[in-house]
Amino acid sequence: MQGIRKSRPQASHGKAALPALVLAAASLAGCAQTPANTAAAADMPGFQHGVVRFNSCAKPNYPADAAAANIQGTVTLRFMVETDGQASASEVVTSSGNTSLDEAARQAIAKCTFTPGTLNGKPQRGWTQVRYVWSIS
């Protein structure tokens, strides 16, 4: 894991709650769901995993329906990071239990940029994992 950030709605003088996003990123290369070519690259000496550029990520809005119902949860996503640092595909690995929280996290990660993984110094596409923690406090 690279770090954890939490998403909490915060009341602002009667305005809609806004989250302070929390991300936790970890590499997923080599897991059973990873395509064979990506897993093979991850197992090779000289492979470095891709990382999220946290400062490139916009904070997602806490979904209004979830905030109104005081719904919290953690969603784990995996996504393909291309050699240009963009996420090209994403999917929910572990649901928060609420589809609006899951979808808000998936949309947010699509707007982030990443430092792609490398193999012997050359950019490689590969799967990476991120966890969004949605918390009301």
Image (tube, rainbow, N blue to C red):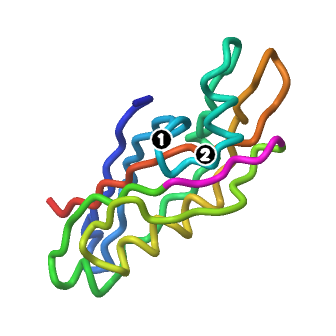
Left or right of 35? Residue 18 is left
Left or right of 89? Residue 17 is left
- Quadrant in which the C terminus is drawn: bottom left
Establish if 110 lies above or below 6.
Answer: below
- Quadrant in which the N terminus is drawn: top left
Establish if 81 lies above or below 3.
Answer: below
Amino acid type indicated by mark 2: Trp
Amino acid type indicated by mark 1: Cys
Q: Nearer the viewer, residue 33 or 121?
A: 33
Establish if 66 lies above or below 120.
Answer: below
Quadrant of res 65? bottom left
Q: Cα distance, mark 1 to mark 2? A: 10 Å
Q: Nearer the viewer, mark 1 or mark 2?
A: 1
Q: Residue at x 66, y 52 (%)?
A: 80
Crowd class of label 1 (few under 14; some 14 to 19; many from 20; radius 10 Å): few
User: What range of the chain is rendered magenta?
Assistant: 78-83
Residue behind mark 2: 127
Left or right of 98? Residue 114 is right
**Badge 1 vs badge 2, beta-carbon distance below 8 Å:** yes
Residue behind mark 1: 31
Where's residue 45, x and y in %?
67, 12
Where's residue 134, x and y in %?
28, 61
SS state under label 2 = strand
Establish if 116 lies above or below 68.
Answer: above
